[in-house]
Image: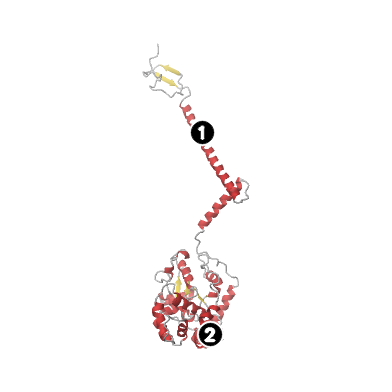
Amino acid sequence: MSAPPCGNTSGTGSPLGFAPPHDYLYTTRLWKPGLLVYTEQQKTWNTHKQWLMSENMRHRCLLLVVCGWVFFTLLFVLFIKDKEYGTKSQTFDYTVTTYIERLKLQEESLLTYKKPTESPLNEVDSHWDAVHIERLSLLENVCKNTSLKNLTHSSITKFVLDRIFVCDKHKILFCQTPKVGNTQWKKVLIVLNGEYKFIEDIPESLIHNHEKNGLPRLSSYSPSEVSERLNTYFKFFIVRDPFERLTSAFKDKFLKNPRFEPWYKYKIAPAIIQKYRRNRTETKGIQFDDFIRYLGDPNHKWLDVKIGESIIHWATYVELCAPCEIKYDVIGHHETLEKDAPYIIKKAGINHLVSYPQIPPGITAYNRTKIDKYFTGISKRDVKRLAARFRGDFKLFGYAEPDFLLN
């Protein structure tokens, strides 16, 4: 008996009613009673899969060839460039190594672009301990000299506590002595207190704004808190030749006035002129001899009260910081600030956190020529009276008294 038709009426030759792909081979139809068995003898669907895989591999090979061509083209360009600029490299390996090293240097420069307040003042002089021991020993001996007591001792008043800035986070007290580089030390403390991360980020207008710079004064603490900090915190301040400091104060406040503080010109200068100008027909602004006569007057206190806090720029170190009453750990000198700054920072235990800003060469050196220039025409009487007032500062901190101005 012949087999019944397989149900394909489409003329395709397929028992399933559709035409298979042209590369599929159907060779045998096997019938058993009641069951249709359709057997595929390859090439089957696996043939199609193999074809797809071969196409995929071909594309990958082409991609690798293109990438290789681009890579070696770049190497060739780098090689030629190095030769044009005199590089001694003779192989592709050396060129690649050089290029990678350049990239690493660029990456390192970006990562270290803002290291915390970098400064060349990083190394502490190994002999500087002896220098500071000698300074503190001199201070102690002069403080004990009863004949100088009126010039070297000062009570710890609110005026003194107002001068001392506090860094509780690192247990540091800094007594402000204007015209000896205090602005830079304020920047250091602002960074330590966490107000800014880098010294370079601190706006200049903020540094002396004591309501916004985040530097508390010791006077803002209770008596017990003041006592605790004076007894346990690291304490320091900076001094400078007394007469050179006065010339700097006069220039900064009455001649230049870079921070635009008009009260020096319109309030303080007229008050000094009215009391101390000898030539009443003189119509110029305040002169240095007016300033010196005011400072050398034994009765200057009444005008100090009228002037107010601005006197900090020419008050004595004794009046500002009470060095015989407060036991300071370090007293730096403006003239040796390049060595004193890193020493102070290391002694305070903050050398891993901040560095003192870079000091322009020669700016801290003692300048006798400038003192001679300012004091030209000042009478010996006025020089003697001024030296008498600041004698305590000269003695306590080892500065030579200005006898050359009297010769």
Give x and y (percent) for residue 78: 57, 47
Front residue of 27 and 66: 66
Q: Tell me, yes or no, if residue 333 can be seen here.
A: no
**Residue 67 higher or lower than 316, as above or below:** above
Quadrant placement of the N terminus: top left
Amino acid of disc 2: Lys
Front residue of 70 and 338: 70
Structural crowding at the residue carrying mark 2, measured as other residues with C-alpha within 10 Å and reported as few (<14), some (14–19) or many (≥20): some
Which mark, by number, is residue 144? 2
Front residue of 300 and 128: 300
Quadrant placement of the C terminus: bottom right
**Residue 213 higher or lower than 155, as above or below:** above
Give x and y (percent) for residue 188: 48, 68
Structural crowding at the residue carrying mark 1, measured as other residues with C-alpha within 10 Å and reported as few (<14), some (14–19) or many (≥20): few
Dot 1: what SS?
helix
Q: Tell me, yes or no, if residue 31 can be seen here.
A: yes
Numbered marks: total: 2
Instruction: Tell me which corner region of the image, top left, top right, bottom left or bottom right, holds residue 137.
Output: bottom right
Amino acid of disc 1: Arg
Residue at the spot 53% in from the left edge and 85% down from the top edge:
144
Which mark, by number, is residue 261? none
Disc nearest the viewer among 1 and 2: 1
Residue at the spot 41% in from the left edge and 80% down from the top edge:
268
Dot 2: what SS?
helix
Give x and y (percent) for residue 305: 40, 83
Task: Name the image colouring.
Answer: secondary structure
- Which of marks 2 and 1 precedes in the sequence? 1
Q: Which residue is mark 1?
A: 58
Q: Are marks 1 and 2 in contact (CB under 8 Å)?
A: no
Front residue of 200 and 79: 79
